[in-house]
Amino acid sequence: MLCKINHTILKRCVLVLMMLSCAILLVGIRVNGYILDEDGKGIEGAYIRLGSRATRSLRDGSYKIEARGDSLQVSRLGYAKKSVKAKAGRLDVVLKSQPIVLPTVRVSQSYEPYFRAADMLSVPIDPDRHYYSTMDMLGEASGTLSQDTPLKGEHQNVELLGNLPRHTLVLLDGVPLNADGESFDFSLLDPQNIQSIQIIKNNASVYGGAAAIGGVVMITSKQPSKEADEYKTSLELGSFGYADLRLSLKGGWDWFFYRLALGMFNADNDFSFKPRPWWNQEKDGVRDNNAKQQNSFSLGLGASFKNLLLTLQSELEYYHRQLPGTINFLEVYRNAYLQGHDNRNRLNIESNWNWLNIRGQLWANRSKSLYDNTTAPMAVYKSKYEQQLDKAGVQLSLDKSQGLLRFNTTAAYTYSEYDNHNHIRPKDSIYVTENQGSISLKGGVDKELGDWNIASYLAGRRDFTEKDDLSSGRVELEIKHFGLLQTSFGGTWGTSFAFPSYFDLHWKGDSQAIGNPNLRSETSQGGQVWLDLSGLSYHLRVGAHINTVKDMIQWRQVQMFGNAWKPFNIGKVQLRNLELEGSWDAREWLNLKADALITDARDISNLPFKEAPKLMYTPRLKYGLKASVSHWNQNIWAKYIYRGEQFITPDNIAAPIEGYDLLDLGWETSFKVWKTTLNLHLKLQNVLNKRYEVYPYIPQPGRAVYFGAQIVF
């Protein structure tokens, strides 16, 4: 069971959800009837929409729907669309036949796979909202958490369900970005290049390999495609010396298309903080030496030939980041910086032969950086090293659908080369190469039974490395019921693994930290169950998760190594989560959302769960509330979040860091001037100017204001 939680907050959340559900059920009109052709025969599968709700007609053409709205809109391939005035009770609609004329076309969009993970959720990216970072987008999903400094250019990673950031596998167009044991820095991705984000929670190594203990974040970039030519330019200005300039364009011809994006930003990121009471310092301190600069370039090329699609995509980011230390050691790290570049390249080949979908991919990534802390006033931890990680791979995937059967197999090979050159002590430099292969299989059934749909899948994967051969698996079940109240319930159970990073294994670059070449890979197993309800204009989801991680790697300070930090496989950890999520379209112009995550994560290596110490830096309670008002061409939103207290020592003896809450406000508008569209956006961050810390002696910024404009030609 979960540990004792804040019952008052839970009772209020449940009460609010119940009140919302009851209120919603009392609103709207109920319409039922038949969708018929000109001969009076029922039409199956017609799409029916009333207000914000939609449904489809059954085999005999019957339908029923309940929602608020003035008109009932009906459409079906092969028939002319029709809109009729909505009224309560029986309403039959007759559609006129409209023959389909098929011109010669070429494929210009990536094919969808025949089936996907049963629990895959799409992040609800609002097309009317401007996103300042990729973490802004991920923040729309429940169960996600980022505890990094919320300023442009700062390192940003994400936790899923209380798991460590390095236990979240990130896939960009199917390519793993952090399977080598490190957390991924989302600040390197331009949100304007992202088309969609899907999340698979709980053990999911079968979908990408190492690091998926907490789940997978699957990012799909904007693909080059044959659409209308478009040119965009934007400028953003904000607090702490922030300025951002971007340009993008896309277009193409009959069979060839392209997309190009350029961007650059600068941010000083210097902000004030409250000194500790015992410092006897009257004025606020300043966290300076914190500037960030980044230039980005993205290019996408595509070509289509009948049922063959080719795409080539490349992204390049150059960055320079000043890295101040904790506020109790500012002079130890003053003038420290990190600079480098990241380059990602992918060539995709796709073909669909009706019964078989074939996808091939070649990719090559490079990450190179230089860290320098040799000019600090207090040269206590002098360090200078340059590291480069090159990865290249090939992947082939086959999807087959036959009746109710679904099948997928994927084979991949990856070559890695890691070079860490120590400029101060060259003998401590590191050079490692690694070959890795994998093969995965997934099969199952997807069966429709009237208003019901049952999907069950079994997946397995085997990864081959020079050190370990690791297996992972997953069982999935989802049952859906379509109707006035759409219901989905199901569950998964799986196993996953994570490799120790090159840093964990081999680091010996300074007196603060020593690597451990004897580290073992982390393994895990766990599952989840969920219930999803969608009715009228509301959506509710409840999920329960459990995950047990063995041989978990943590850095510990040990006196026998000269008071240095060293990574160890500490033993066994268990995480239990209760996830709540709800949304309500209260009006056509008003949307309300709420989510909560209750996490109990403990080190159960030596004690039973109830007596075991809680994991460090894992808040027990997280919840958020959001309201969005859209009217005409205006969109105003407010977002409130709360993060609970968290412990800072393995034994939980030291006092935990207090929880904190934040309020953000935003406004967007859009209007056309001749053939040009002008978009304006404003964001007020940390409106209440809260002073808080996530980690000891690392303060977070106060109130900030950002404003931007975008012109679309």
Image (cartoon, rainbow, N blue to C red):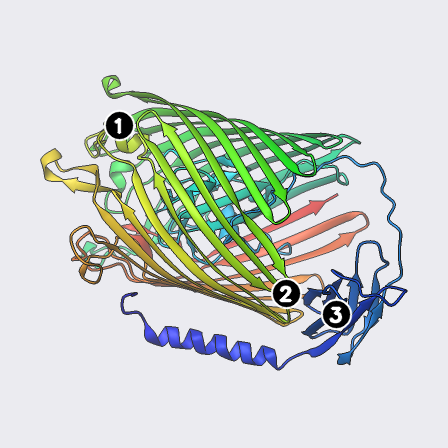
- Which residue is denoted by mark 1 in the rendering? 506
How crowded pointer 3 is (Cα within 10 Å; few <14, some 14-19, many 20+) is rated as some
Q: Residue at x 26, y 17 (%)?
A: 426
Determine whether 558 is above or below 596 in the image. above
Tell me the SS state at disc 3: strand
Q: Residue at x 67, y 62 (%)?
A: 634
Q: Earlier in the sequence, mark 2 or mark 1?
A: 2
Check whether the beta carbons of the residues at disc 1 and disc 3 lie within 8 A of each other: no
Q: Earlier in the sequence, mark 1 or mark 3?
A: 3
Determine whether 411 is above or below 650 in the image. above
- Which residue is denoted by mark 2 in the rendering? 451
Q: Which mark is residue 276?
A: none
Q: How many marks?
A: 3
- For the residue marked with disc 1, what is the amino acid? His
Determine whether 244 is above or below 437 in the image. below
**Residue 526 seen in this snapshot:** yes
Report the front residue among 624 and 304: 304
Q: Quadrant of the C terminus?
A: top right
Relative side of 56 to 75, left or right: left
- For the residue marked with disc 2, what is the amino acid? Asp
- Which residue is denoted by mark 3 in the rendering? 62
How far separated are the C-alphas under marks 2 and 3?
12 Å
Instruction: Please name which of the two marks, 2 or 1, marks the residue nearer to the observer.
Output: 2
| Residue 292 horizontal/vertical position (percent) | 44, 38
